[in-house]
Amino acid sequence: MENIKKDTEERMNKALAALDKEFDKLRTGRASTSLVDNVKVDYHGTPTPIQQLASVAIPDSRSITIQPWDKSAFSLIEKALQKSDLGINPVNDGKIIRINIPPLTEDRRKDLAKLAKKYAEEAKVAVRNIRRDANDAFKKLEKDKTISEDDHKKSSDVVQKTTDSFVQKIDQRLTAKEKEIMEI
């Protein structure tokens, strides 16, 4: 029973970590190196993350600089950024690639807030599925006469409390992300 409870909490933590990762990818009008985390550059025929080809820095809140270690990677990185779905236009001066982050429009902010809600809802569904798996495991243990009905009830209550706590954490993160997105 303890293993099931521990496994349940670990899986819920992973769902929360996945939500944080999704939230990091959302552009909020502020520069963040995580914006270019998923951009892959076709470097010598291999899709390579930008961080493995260049140093990525944030000189101010509205721009990102990318300094490739290999001069031949300049145009490849620039093309990859233009093809990405970030809606950004990189500027290459021969030494450094600069990305200026334009301020978000009101419509774009609302779209991003909707997307954040969608990610949060997906995380809640994942947490509820994990709860269901744990409860199914407890039912099976009770059916196999490994645990009593009381133990099953107590364990299910503990899992429900854990689930409620994680759903609350997801809601808190969503509220913070929406505030960040809507902030001008």
Image (spheres, rainbow, N blue to C red):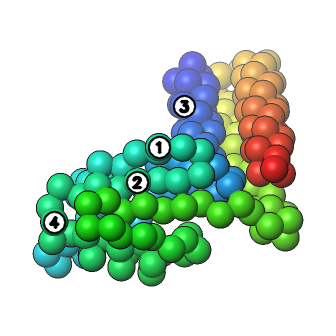
Which of labels 2 and 3 is toward the front?
Answer: 2
Disc 4 secondary structure class = loop
Q: Report the residue marked by disc 4.
A: 71
Query: Is 149 displayed left or right of 44 in the figure?
Result: right
Q: Report the residue marked by disc 3.
A: 10
Point out the tag, 4 or 1, that comes first from the N-terminus: 1
Q: Report the residue marked by disc 2.
A: 65
For disc 4, the neighbor class at 10 Å (few under 14, some 14 to 19, many from 20) is few
Specify the amino acid type for callout 4: Lys
Q: Report the residue marked by disc 1.
A: 59
Cα–Cα span, label 3 and label 1: 37 Å
Specify the amino acid type for callout 1: Pro
Disc 2 secondary structure class = strand
Give me the residue at 54% from left, 71% from top: 88
Check contact, mark 3 vs mark 4: CB within 8 A.
Answer: no
Q: Quadrant of residue 166?
A: top right
Q: Which mark is residue 141?
A: none
Question: Percent from the top left, x then y, of residue 47?
Answer: 26, 71
Point out the tag, 2 or 1, that comes first from the N-terminus: 1
Give me the residue at 64% from left, 49% from top: 30
For disc 1, the neighbor class at 10 Å (few under 14, some 14 to 19, many from 20) is few
184 w.r.t. 103: above or below: above
Query: Is 163 displayed left or right of 15 in the figure?
Result: right
Check contact, mark 2 vs mark 3: CB within 8 A.
Answer: no
Cα–Cα span, label 4 and label 1: 21 Å
